[in-house]
């Protein structure tokens, strides 16, 4: 039985707490603080000791008991740990803030306090109501589910095992293809040339960049397919123009998929880069503070100066579309294969590359015109006007025309032999068809009768 006592320094003090000592599930003596009332402390000691005995006897599952205790823990403390884990993975600050904002939005909207409150049905009901109220797209809806799903995976990771399974796994996603709110379009080569000329001749500054600098940004984006953040990370040391094949290197910290990327450079771009980099130090940024600028404002102003609409029925021509989308589309228009375009775009799947390829009806007609038509001339010497073969006159016809005795082709022995051969082949084919429809039963060789 557990013993209840007051510690030596608390003896004689009114209002001092009682303590009790018991044997835990591992057989070790433990001491725990009770209440100021001795009777209540004795009841607590008896309960704790009884539970310890059940654990020693195997009547209480220790693992399940630990999971139940963690389910009663506050969600906020796990959110803080999850945020620190996201930062430790070297994710960008923008990604971490966006993910945590979406996770906390769902947690607060579902009014969860402890881990045991988290239910998939609550998430689905809340997000459905939010989509109807705020008219968010299916893609944005999926992004919220992706954020809360990542939090559930983090909780259920085998190294942590805070909860047994991810409660948000299996929540159905919405089809983003039927609800596209921001359709992009690629520029044609002629439109892109006009944009460069408009930027260089504008004489105005947009987002703190002169017309010449904006033209350089557009050129680099178009000829490499790099994203705005990746272009912003480039320094003079990112380029190797002296190699046999000049290259540009995007460090893993700036790349979207967090891997180091090495891309070849166009010969014309190499010529221009030599002038751009001549006055920069090894670690000087090529376009300082580009990552904090709004790319759509840059391109929209220059599109306006060039007389090209920013938004059309095909979509918008923002910075990403004018650079990366145009880069991939022009690669395919000018003979690059789909695997080559996928590698240059650094996509893991060609299906993603196809979303960047804006192949219109004119491109399809041009490809169709390249279809070879040599088949039209095959057999022209031995065919009629409609392409069917013309039968050669047989011997009987020649004899008849010349007044010979063979007035009927049936009397021709060669003709009769060929007819018999064709008849035999037809009969053989018919037998094989019947045999395939009604196969002969398998018999042992000794059981066959020879007549």
Image: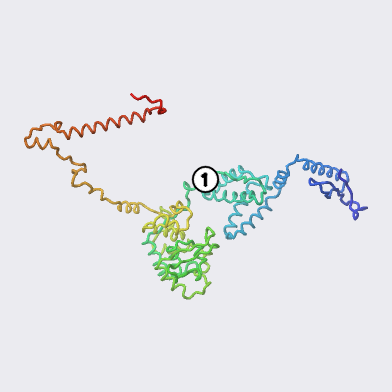
* Position in image of residue 407 (x %, y %): 10, 32
Q: How many numbered marks does the figure carry?
A: 1
Q: Secondary structure at mark 1?
A: loop
* Position in image of residue 77 (x %, y %): 69, 53
Which residue is pictured at 25% across the width and 31% down the height? 424
On screen, residue 277 above or below 60: below
Which residue is pictured at 19% across the width and 33% down the height? 417
Camera-nearest residue between 409 and 293: 409
- Residue at image mark 1: 174
Outermost residue toward the right? 12
Camera-nearest residue between 196 and 447: 447
* Position in image of residue 217 (x %, y %): 46, 66
On screen, residue 227 above or below 278: above
Which residue is pictured at 73% across the width and 42% down the height? 61
* Position in image of residue 330 (x %, y %): 39, 59
On screen, residue 389 above or below 278: above
């Amino acid at each position: 039985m557990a013993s209840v006592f007051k510690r030596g320094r608390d003896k004689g003090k009114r209002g001092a707490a009682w303590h009790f000592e018991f044997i835990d599930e591992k057989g070790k003596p433990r001491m725990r603080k009770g209440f100021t009332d001795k009777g209540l402390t004795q009841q607590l000691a008896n309960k704790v000791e009884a539970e310890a005995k059940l654990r020693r006897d195997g009547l209480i599952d220790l693992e399940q008991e630990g999971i139940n205790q963690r389910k009663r823990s506050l969600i906020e403390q796990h959110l803080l740990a999850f945020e620190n884990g996201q930062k430790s993975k070297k994710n960008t600050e923008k990604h971490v803030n966006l993910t945590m904002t979406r996770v906390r939005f769902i947690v607060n909207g579902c009014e969860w306090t402890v881990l045991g409150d988290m239910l998939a049905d609550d998430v689905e009901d809340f997000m459905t109501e939010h989509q109807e109220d705020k008219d968010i797209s299916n893609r944005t809806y999926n992004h919220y589910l992706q954020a809360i799903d990542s939090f559930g995976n983090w909780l259920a990771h085998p190294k942590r095992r805070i909860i047994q399974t991810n409660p948000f796994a299996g929540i159905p996603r919405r089809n983003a293809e039927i609800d596209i709110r921001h359709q992009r379009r690629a520029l044609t080569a002629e439109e892109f040339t006009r944009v460069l000329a408009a930027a260089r001749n504008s004489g105005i500054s947009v987002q703190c960049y002169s017309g010449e600098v904006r033209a350089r940004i557009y050129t680099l984006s178009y000829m490499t397919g790099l994203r705005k953040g990746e272009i912003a990370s480039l320094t003079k040391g990112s380029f190797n123009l002296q190699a046999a094949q000049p290259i540009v290197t995007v460090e893993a910290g700036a790349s979207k998929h967090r891997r180091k990327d090495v891309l070849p450079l166009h010969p014309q771009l190499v010529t221009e880069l030599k002038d751009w980099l001549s006055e920069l130090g090894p670690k000087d940024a090529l376009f300082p503070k580009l990552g904090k600028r709004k790319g759509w404002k840059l391109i929209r102003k220059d599109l306006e100066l060039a007389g090209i609409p920013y938004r059309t029925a095909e979509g918008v021509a923002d910075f990403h579309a004018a650079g990366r989308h145009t880069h991939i589309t022009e690669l395919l228009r000018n003979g690059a294969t789909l695997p080559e375009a996928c590698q240059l775009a650094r996509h893991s799947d060609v299906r993603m590359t196809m979303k960047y390829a804006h192949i219109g009806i004119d491109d399809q007609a041009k490809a169709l015109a390249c279809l070879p038509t040599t088949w039209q001339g095959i057999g022209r010497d031995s065919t009629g006007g409609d392409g069917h073969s013309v039968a050669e006159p047989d011997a009987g016809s020649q004899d008849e025309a010349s007044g010979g005795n063979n007035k009927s082709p049936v009397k021709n022995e060669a003709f009769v032999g060929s007819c018999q051969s064709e008849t035999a082949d037809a009969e053989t084919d018919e037998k094989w068809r019947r045999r395939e429809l009604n196969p002969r039963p398998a018999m042992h060789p000794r059981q066959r009768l020879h007549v």
